[in-house]
Amino acid sequence: MNKVTKTIHITANNHGQRLDKFLADFDLEKSRAAWQKLIKSGKVLVNDNATEANYSIKTADKIEILKEDLPVERAMSVPDIKIIYEDENVIVIDKPIGVVAQRTETSDAPAVTDFLENHFPAIKKVGEDEQRSGIVHRLDKDTSGIMIAAKNQEAFEFLKDRFKKREVQKLYTALVYGKVEPEKGEIDFAIGRNPKSPCKQTIVRNPDTSTVKCRVARTLYRTIKSSEDYSLLEVELKTGRMHQIRVHMKAIGHPVVGDPKYATPKLLQSTPGLKRQFLHASELKITLPDGKKGIFHSELPNDLRSFLKKHSDLD
């Protein structure tokens, strides 16, 4: 029997959508054409039955995505990733864009886990499941920068506890649309899944009365440079929610430049030279399992630096 890798329950907000379009919106890492191929091959079930890509989903439908047989070419696709630091317990990497944190059954994108397992095969057994491969935190596919992974189970539990207790300092460099005022501030809106668009997150202004399941989220920012059109920010995450910076910056009226999920089409059209969100994990401070204080830095990648150079008031 094929293993079910994901189950989705359809709400009234998505009633009437085509199945292939809904799935492409739900998981942007796989194209609509790729989803159509999966549906045709019987790897997507609706209410326990195979169906067609043009099926109109209905409220209360149950969609199940079955385990996909990975081709040999996919299994051997190992991304080229720079190692910033490594010891017997941890490995710190500089993740490039276009690389997901963990391999999935619905994406052909190269994964950090592929790199880690190729570099240190024993890491495959580290973590809470066989697909984690030592990863204790994630970056979005098109967010670049620093990630840390554990090389043994004891180190994994140690790092996971540091993140859980919020004893890790995570700094990001972000370029956002518009001039942010005040130049320094805190954003503390709770964050939950957007009921109208399950592949997105949304802020929840009144968690106690909202029907949206949400979690506390806290973001600090300070302006490095700004113009009338853009603000270059240093952003610190005090919590680690999915898309937190992207959602919080949109909430205060300053979406991350180039963000395909949270910036408006009009804003995206104004920055055609940038092919992804201008967001980079630039610094990580954490106590390592051996007791040492780790401070790791990552420079802005070339695509982001090139964009800044085109705007001399920000470079």
Image (cartoon, rainbow, N blue to C red):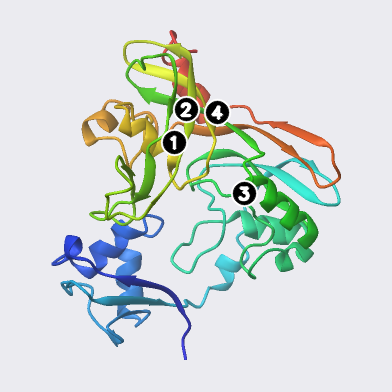
- Residue that mark 4 sits on: 302
| Amino acid type at mark 2 | Ala
Provide the secondary structure element on which disc 2 rests. strand
The mark that comes first in sequence, 4 or 3, is 3
Query: In the image, 232: left or right of 13?
Result: right
Q: How many marks?
A: 4
Residue 236, position as x, y percentages in the image? 54, 30
Identify the disc placed on residue 258: none
Is residue 271 something that shows in the picture?
Answer: yes
Side of 36 where 135 appears, left or right: right
Judge depth for marks 4 and 3 and give the one in front. 3
User: From the viewer's perspective, is the residue at label 2 or at label 4 nearer?
Assistant: 2
How busy is the neighbourhood of tag 3: few (under 14 within 10 Å), some, or many (20 plus)? few
Q: Identify the residue at the far left of this view.
A: 16
| Secondary structure type for disc 4 | helix
Query: Which circle, 2 or 1, is nearer the viewer?
Result: 1
Residue tagged 1: 245
Q: Amino acid at mark 4?
A: Asn
10 Å neighbourhood of mark 2: few (<14), some, or many (≥20)?
A: many
- Disc 3 from disc 1: Cα separation: 18 Å
Badges 2 and 1: C-beta atoms under 8 Å apart?
A: yes
* Distance from Cα at disc 2 to Cα at disc 1: 9 Å
Q: Residue at x 25, y 67 (%)?
A: 20
Q: Amino acid at mark 1?
A: Ile
Front-lying residue, 277 or 211? 211
Q: Earlier in the sequence, mark 2 or mark 1?
A: 2
Q: Look at 43% across and 44% down and name the residue there.
A: 243
Residue 170 vs residue 247: left or right? right
